[in-house]
Amino acid sequence: KRKFESGRPAANTKLDKKKVRLIRTRGGNRKFRALSNDHGNFNWASQGVTKKTTIVNAVYNSTNNELVRTNTLVKNMIVLIDATPFANWINEHFYGMHGEELKDTKVKLEFETGEAKGDTDKFLARRLSNTIEPALQKQLQKGTVLACISSRPGQSGRCDGYILEGTELEFYQRKLIKKKNK
């Protein structure tokens, strides 16, 4: 019988063109209820870069396969995102390509090994001191990358997350193979 006891229906944020509704909450504050969303900021932690990119598909959710089937976006869902912004960043940061050069260039992942001798350019120095793990290289070549949603789309109206790397990436790749073989 009290206003604060009443709940609201779930947002069930779908993978579609962005549609957000404002909801007034207690104290006059606001929540942003995302009814659908198809873009988000995704962080590549090992390289320290964040890019806005398109969400391609919902792939895995540990709590409910129904969410994957219906393309419902929730926190901690594994999604496929477009790798183009990250591939362009690699070409800019490690090879110095800009503007028109990026449009028809594939991502270059063959970094030199060894040590910089004498007066080298900054791009060569970056390539020498950096590596991108092979599992992530394959995904970048394919054009899609596995990522995890870390925001709550039904509460914040945004769909942000991070790219899977290392043991976490291996774990979810095994899960996806098992799911495919069922």
Image: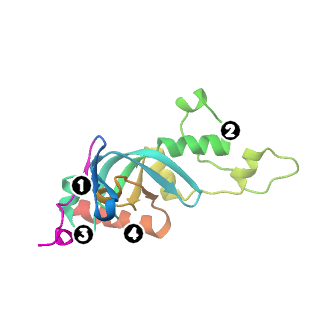
At 17% from the left and 60% from the top, the residue drawn is 9
Marks 2 and 4: in contact by CB < 8 Å?
no
Q: Say which label, 4 or 3, has the lower sequence index.
A: 3
State how far apart marks 4 and 2 are (Cα).
34 Å
The span shown in magenta is: 1-16
At 16% from the left and 72% from the top, the residue drawn is 2
Q: Position of residue 182 (x, y in %)?
A: 20, 64
Give me the disc on residue 96.
Answer: 2
Q: Residues within 10 Å of mark 4 (few under 14, many from 20)?
A: few
- Residue 106 lies, with reference to residue 11, above or below; the image says above
Tell us which disc is closer to us: 1 or 2. 1
Quadrant of the image for the N terminus? bottom left
Q: Residue 57 colored magenta?
A: no
Could you tell me what secondary structure mostly forms the magenta stretch? loop
Query: Could you tell me the amino acid type at mark 2?
Result: Gly
Q: Residues within 10 Å of mark 2 (few under 14, many from 20)?
A: some
Q: Is residue 57 left or right of residue 88?
A: left
In the picture of the structure, the residue carrying the numbered disc 4 is 171
State how far apart marks 3 and 1 are (Cα).
12 Å
State how far apart marks 1 and 2 are (Cα).
39 Å
State how far apart marks 2 and 3 are (Cα).
43 Å
At 18% from the left and 67% from the top, the residue drawn is 7
